[in-house]
Image (cartoon, rainbow, N blue to C red):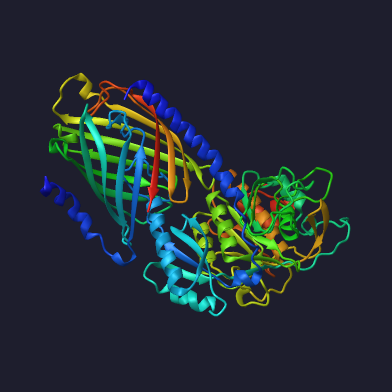
Amino acid sequence: MTTARLAKLLAALVALIVVLLLAVPAVLAAEPKPGQPTEADEAQRVLVLLDMPAPHFRPDANYAGGYVDPAARSARRRTVNALARTYGLRLVTDWPLPALGVDCYVLDVPASLRPDAVAERLSREPHVAWAQPMNMFRLQGQPMHDDPLFALQPAAREWRLAQLHAAATGRGVRVAVVDSGVQRDHPDLAGQIALNANFVTDHADTAELHGTAVAGIVAARADNRVGIVGIAPHAELLALRGCWQSAGADTVCTSLTLALALHKAIERGAQVINLSLGGPADRLVQRLIESAQQRGAIVVAAADRRQPRGGFPASLAKVVAVVDEGPASSPAMIAPGTDVPTTLPGSRWATVTGSSYAAAHVSGLLALVLELQSRAGGSVASPADAIALGADRRVDACASLSRASQLCTCDCEQAAAAGSIVRH
Amino acid sequence: MRGAVRSALAPIALLLGGAAQAQLGATVSVDSDYRFRGVSLSDSKPAWRVTLNHDFASRAYAGVSATRVELARDDQYSQLAAYAGYVTQPLDGKALEFGASFSHFTGDSSYDYVEAYAGVLAEHWSLRLHYAPDYFGRGVQAAYVDAGAHWPLSEQLRVFGHAGALVPLAGRSFGPDDRRTRLDLRLGIGMSVGSLDIQLAWVDATRGGPYPAVYGGRRNTWQLGALLSF
């Protein structure tokens, strides 16, 4: 082959790949979207997790060079198709979850079968790591008051927020808010969100109440002469939409949407992950929470007082469980969560109440603690050590920061007199 | 040589338990130029490859592949390669890998050679050290350091990079060029759509190094490849 012919061949091949790069996404985008599934549809699904072989040496230079080995993935696709045929299921979609070393397949279960029974049988199949029903989660917020924002934030009084901010503002700490959609251009949130990602592909990506409210409590902009001040206004906020606001104003999530948002939080190295939600125990979500914890992240969850030990995921080991008012029946800590002014969609502010917002306060406080510990060159021994509690399990924000920095944050005169910590 | 293959693969065979959860996959690929460690093994012509790979639940793997090569002008052979290895459970996101491969060239088995490798694998990068006691059957011991990384740009697109160093350790030499360390580089973009994976890469290599080396043709080129998996 002459050089000229080779050049022509290469030019043709380059043209081909350019056409493919441009055309294929367009073709994919042009595909009609499936009908939006209802909550009942979601609840009639199972998740099947197949082990993903570790990436390894291959002699073919064209190997994808990533965690998804194309040949092995085709093999898993054949396996799940065979299972779908055997059980009369319909494959909806699939997602790789390399942090857990599994591929996650979503399958529709016929109305005549119970998803939990199908999942149990699927779990016994030799190719399946595990299978589980698609659980539904509900966010823990109470109905908000639609009053104008004039009141002081509870944290400003109870936590002495301005004094805390003299010591730390969460700078350089990544906080993932796994929640519903956040209004990114809200006057108090514009420029505060380092990453926005949507994992609820069946519902339009839009600003929603719960996510916008939680994000504002964690990281609303400070000193901008509007709205409120976030607990950690300089934190790097990862707004991960794993939940959506349903027609009845309920905010819901599925095992899959939560898992994908958690996976993104892990992938992006979130140091604090806020889960202001609760639902049934879920193996996939639990595994991802444990994976995040193994990688050093602190997971904060809103506890449900009606559930034993606060319900799932608040009851998991090492998860920081938070409620808004005491006395807590579970081992949860208490943080401000009643009549909290915060950001809302439509560039508004109003007050909200619930454990969701108490959890958001603690996530913000952890960002301050981590910033101080990072500056001091230390690390968090355990989530329990990061937050100081009063006798009634109420969060003592000043003591938490003082412990992290070994410097006085509030009540300096008293602390100096006691000689326990250095004056700041 | 058959004995050498059996010896190389025997320890791996012991690890191949849990066949019930094994995953068998096949790929067919075409490259505009079969570049191996920066050197064209197809005389800068397009080359095909078929690979069968088996992943076992025990984290062991094994496979075979066949491809067309042209080690000397107009001397076309098929290269048949068998490989097997084991990847440990990841710890802090990193796993260790051990394995061996054997290459046989139909038509001229004097090029046959065995190679062992070990490495560290992470989610977005890998680092391996290969050792061949008789590289391409030319009486030269060689080591190859292989570093690779990739980063997803979207669900379908990714960028990747590879750098390698082929180091002659001992053995015969036919001239000063043979005793050089050859560096090679591969940078590109890849796209996966369903079962199809397409890569476009820029490949370059320094002069010399153990056989086969860039004696004539181009040391750098664009390389386009397509891989279909089954």
Left or right of residue B101, residue A400 in this image: right
Between residues B225 and A401, which one lies in front from this camera angle? B225
Q: Residue at x 13, y 32 (%)?
A: B139
Left or right of residue B22, residue B107 in this image: left
Residue A38 visible in the current orientation: yes
The C terminus of chain A is located in which quarter?
Answer: top right
Left or right of residue B98, residue A72 in this image: right
Residue A420 visible in the current orientation: no
Q: Is residue B215 above or below residue A336?
A: above
Q: Quadrant of residue B221?
A: top left
- The tally of labels here is 0
Q: Position of residue B162 (x, y in %)?
A: 39, 35
Q: Position of residue A302 (x, y in %)?
A: 66, 66
Q: Residue at x 76, y 46 (%)?
A: A185
Q: Position of residue A359 (x, y in %)?
A: 68, 62
Q: Position of residue A49 (x, y in %)?
A: 46, 64
Between residues B123 and A115, which one lies in front from this camera angle? A115
The N terminus of chain A is located in which quarter?
Answer: top left
Left or right of residue A21, residue A160 in this image: right
Q: Is residue A142 above or below residue A237?
A: below
